[in-house]
């Protein structure tokens, strides 16, 4: 898999201004007396009830054996089948976020708007990453109306792959040829995501 990391100065400035990352004393790394990420259960009866109340769509493994993403299996946030990322095919948008990320909260309604309008042509999957607060994450999804499928990576396993987040939020665009482009998030409208999709996936929406 080839991954192109955008290094344009304007994008980096945008990421610095609009993105956030967990600090050592925030939930997300299991420090400061918090729970270890490796012990976080993202599928409990309470979380399943929250997911159902929020109307979040189920996680669905893809049909591929090597769609271009690394072979890394992530749990479904709030219960459901785990998904091997390598089974997913492009075009696809992955959106990284976590419960305490302010820019993520602002962005998620725009991502949902895009999903409602274009999700049949360009699927969207959220990934709650480096987050030890699955209940807060599901509550945030409910508050922002984010109903697209949500995976969970509380241990930050993605950070050891070519899909390492470049800030929070982050987009990963997987095209039909299995090539991925990482882009800093912080969008404010579905139209902004349309522009990114057209640029990085080569799809006219």
Image (tube, helix red, strand yellow):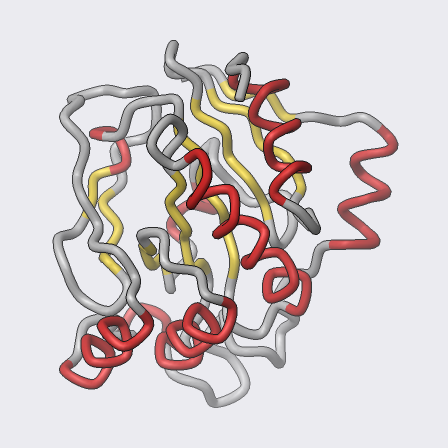
Count of residue discs? 0
Report the residue at 51% width, 15% height from top.
203
Residue found farthest to the bottom = 33
| Image side of residue 121 versus residue 114, left or right | left
Nearer to me, 81 or 108: 108
Residue 119 percent location from the top left of the image = 38, 37
Nearer to me, 32 or 92: 92
Q: Is residue 176 above or below residue 114?
A: above
| Image side of residue 194 versus residue 44, left or right | right
Nearer to me, 112 or 79: 112
Nearer to me, 52 or 68: 52
Q: Is residue 44 above or below residue 145?
A: below
Report the residue at 58% width, 74% height from top.
100
Q: Quadrant of residue 195?
A: top right
Q: Is residue 59 above or below residue 197?
A: below
Q: Quadrant of residue 170?
A: top right
Report the residue at 47% width, 31% height from top.
162
Residue 115 percent location from the top left of the image = 44, 43
Quadrant assignment for the N terminus: top left
Q: Is residue 99 above or below residue 63?
A: below
Report the residue at 29% width, 23% height from top.
89
Residue 117 percent location from the top left of the image = 46, 39
Q: Quadrant of residue 105?
A: bottom right
Residue 152 percent location from the top left of the image = 33, 59
| Image side of residue 80 versus residue 1, left or right | left
């Amino acid at each position: 898999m080839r991954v192109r990391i955008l290094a344009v100065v304007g994008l980096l400035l945008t990421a610095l201004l609009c993105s956030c990352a967990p600090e050592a004393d925030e939930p997300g790394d299991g420090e400061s007396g918090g729970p270890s990420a490796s012990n976080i259960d993202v599928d409990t009866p309470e979380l399943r009830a929250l997911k159902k109340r929020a109307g979040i769509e189920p996680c669905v493994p893809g049909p591929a054996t090597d769609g271009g993403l690394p072979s890394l299996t992530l749990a479904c946030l709030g219960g459901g089948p785990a998904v091997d990322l390598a089974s997913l095919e492009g075009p696809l948008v992955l959106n990284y976020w976590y419960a305490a990320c302010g820019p993520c909260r602002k962005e998620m309604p725009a991502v949902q708007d895009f999903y409602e309008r274009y999700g049949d042509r360009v699927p969207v999957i959220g990934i709650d990453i480096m987050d030890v607060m699955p209940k807060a994450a599901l509550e945030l999804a409910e508050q922002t109306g984010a109903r697209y499928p949500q995976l969970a990576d509380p241990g930050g396993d993605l950070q050891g792959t070519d899909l390492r987040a470049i800030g929070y939020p982050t987009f990963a665009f997987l095209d039909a040829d299995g090539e991925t482009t990482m882009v800093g998030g912080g969008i404010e409208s579905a139209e902004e995501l349309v522009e990114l999709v057209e640029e990085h996936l080569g799809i006219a929406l």
